[in-house]
Amino acid sequence: MEEQRQGQGQLPGHPGLYVASGLMNFAGALAMVSLCYYAKDHLDANLMQLGVITFLGNFVYVSLCPLLGTLSDRYGRRPFIVSSTLVFASAYFGAYLSTQVWHLYVVTAFSGLGHALFWPAVEAELAAEADSYQLRRRVGRFNISWSIGDIPGALVAGLAYDWQPQLPFLIAAATGVAISAMNAVIRISAHTEETRTRHRETVSGHAVPRDHVTFWRLALLANFFSAGLVSIVRRLFPDLAVEALRYTGTQWGLLVMMVAISRTVVFAIMERRHGWLYRPKRLFFVQLLFPTGCLLIIFAQSYWTFILAFACIGAASGVVYFSSLYYSVHGAGSQAQRAGLHESVLGLGAGVIPLVASSTRRLSEPHWRDAIRAPYLAGAALALLSISIQAVILARSRRAAPPAETP
């Protein structure tokens, strides 16, 4: 209660960044939901090529997030935020012109660069001169904003794709240009030595528990696997949707939208309640929704069962993402560097895990009649592995912790 009273005097700011984040994720969802579906349906990409498209974009993102985050801490965030959406727009205008699968490899690489310029700098700005209460509210509103952007992005992607397969890329490029113009004028903290000093003073007052580093590690590990599982359903499911289920682009867009809707509901709950903070059992329990969702996909025949599966995965990913971002910037001195690491881990999981999972269909085909669903069996196993590793890390940390804090 004391933390809440201290923070209520200053309401969370940065409404311009919330809007920019929502629009950026709208454009990103519009483009990425369409990209692999377009590659499969229009360019006849195989499952391995879908995995490569996913991997390349995330490889660039993972490689550059920590570096660009550090540079934005040093030189200021506005140039990175403004230029990011121009790079993103250029990438998806290239997708609009693409005629071969390898063109999409280049597109997704430049898209990764645009995202690496944008997200670490924006997330660091949320933590600027914020106490613990303000940080939770800012992170919550930021998460709700970008997640809401996913909802119409996924739906518009499906509708636009059914109208004209390359139209989603053109809309995404135009949206990127519009966001860049808006980012040039929205409020961003001045990057001066005075603001650095004020931030260091604020950080010293954050209520960071003694075992904060352990929770940060747990959340980063969970974020790695969570991003990979979400990427499996968003990037590899078109293989099942087109080849076996014969779903339309609109049906596919509605499924992806369910991930965003359930995640947004979770973000709204977590923004208003602080009881989830530093509670490992809650983090472990909610991650059981990942294998549950994957198993539903393996055995599902009804469209409504797929909707439930995607909702389960979206809800769990919301808790994990919020935890990872909050623990990364809570009390951090180099905010963008830590936010960059958070995003880098996310991107690594989103790129590596689908690439690994995409190979399971070919390996399972001699032994399993329904091998097209093998990636989701791998996803369920990886989710259980993640929870087990987190439990071991927590147990070792608590055994090694001193019985009391020394004065």
Image: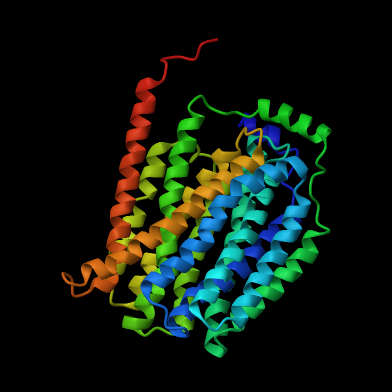
In this picture, residue 405 sits left or right of residue 290: right
- In the picture, residue 332 is in which quadrant? top right
Coloring scheme used: rainbow
**Relative to the observer, which residue lies in front, 89 or 205?**
89
Rendered location of residue 2, percent (x, y)? 63, 29
Residue 6's place in the image compared with 159, above or below, is above
**Relative to the observer, which residue lies in front, 5 or 32?**
32
Residue 375's place in the image compared with 278, above or below, is below
Total residue callouts: 0
Rendered location of residue 367, percent (x, y)? 16, 69
In this view, which residue lies farthest toward the bottom? Answer: 163
The residue shown at (58%, 78%) is 156
The residue shown at (33%, 58%) is 379
Which quadrant would the N terminus be assigned to in this image?
top right
Which quadrant would the C terminus be assigned to in this image?
top right
In this picture, residue 273 sits left or right of residue 11: left
**Relative to the observer, which residue lies in front, 142 or 244?**
244
In this picture, residue 138 sits left or right of residue 36: right
The residue shown at (65%, 80%) is 170
